[in-house]
Image: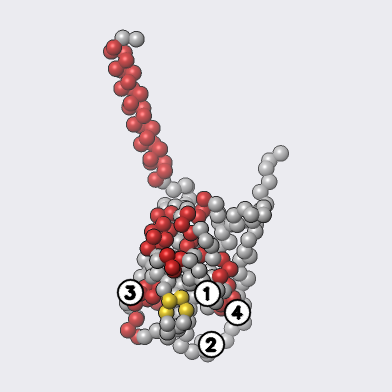
Amino acid sequence: MNKRAKITTGVVIGFAAVCLSWTVLSMSAQAAPGVQEGFDWSGEKIYNRYNDTPLQAMTGTDGRRTLDSFYEKRQYPGSPPIVPHKVAEAFSGDTAKCISCHGRGGYDAEQDAYAPVPPHPENEHCFQCHVPITTEKLFVESDWESVSPPKLGRSMMGGSPPPVPHSLQLREDCIACHTGSGAVAEIRVEHGSRGNCRQCHVPQVTTTTFERNK
């Protein structure tokens, strides 16, 4: 092969490599068909949450926040919880006051409890979904009965990672609920720093057992 042919071959190979790298980058930046962009990759958000939370707030829990108390504050599993404490009128419209306690999950002496951390603090209108109880009287009598909460565990094999039993809408920041002093005791984990939770835990979208084609 002469010198000119070698140069031409090198240029072609280099151009092909550049095109391939562009293709790979564009594919990785696009979400799968029918899935909103960013739905499956919130690792950066989880890492940042972990780094911004003081170590003492990430290790240990008093165990008083249980699944029973968790569901008592919700009309049904997955619904926004009520505000279980008094809220000053001055808080209305000022989300910074809510985040001052709930942003990092610190201890609140007045409530004698650790403030739970919201998985979506960027949604600033807290009172749009979370409201304090002002009366025990029902607005309208109803025979409403809540649905059963999702079952925990359900690992296919002993020791394997359990699936995610709930939707991920507004709950994509896993460690906000599953780590820290304000975490629910039964679902608290010790490995929140791994970041990419859905590498091992996947949403359970069906209860039908998968069977391979024979």
Judging depth in this view, the residue of 158 and 22 nearest the camera is 158
- Badge 1: how crowded within 10 Å, few (<14), some, or many (20+)? few
Q: Amino acid at mark 2?
A: Leu
Picture coordinates of residue 38, whole percent (x, y) = 42, 53
- Badge 4: how crowded within 10 Å, few (<14), some, or many (20+)? few
Q: Earlier in the sequence, mark 3 or mark 1?
A: 1
Dot 1 corresponds to which residue? 62
Dot 2 corresponds to which residue? 138
Picture coordinates of residue 80, whole percent (x, y) = 48, 73
The residues tagged by marks 1 and 4 sit, at their Cα atoms, a distance apart of 33 Å
Question: Residue 96: which disc?
Answer: 3
Picture coordinates of residue 76, whole percent (x, y) = 56, 73
Judging depth in this view, the residue of 55 and 98 nearest the camera is 55
Dot 4 corresponds to which residue? 144
The residues tagged by marks 3 and 1 sit, at their Cα atoms, a distance apart of 26 Å
Q: Residue at x 38, y 32 (%)?
A: 20
Callout 2–callout 3 Cβ contact below 8 Å: no
Q: Amino acid at mark 1?
A: Asp
Residue mark closest to the camera, 3 vs 1: 1
The residues tagged by marks 2 and 4 sit, at their Cα atoms, a distance apart of 12 Å
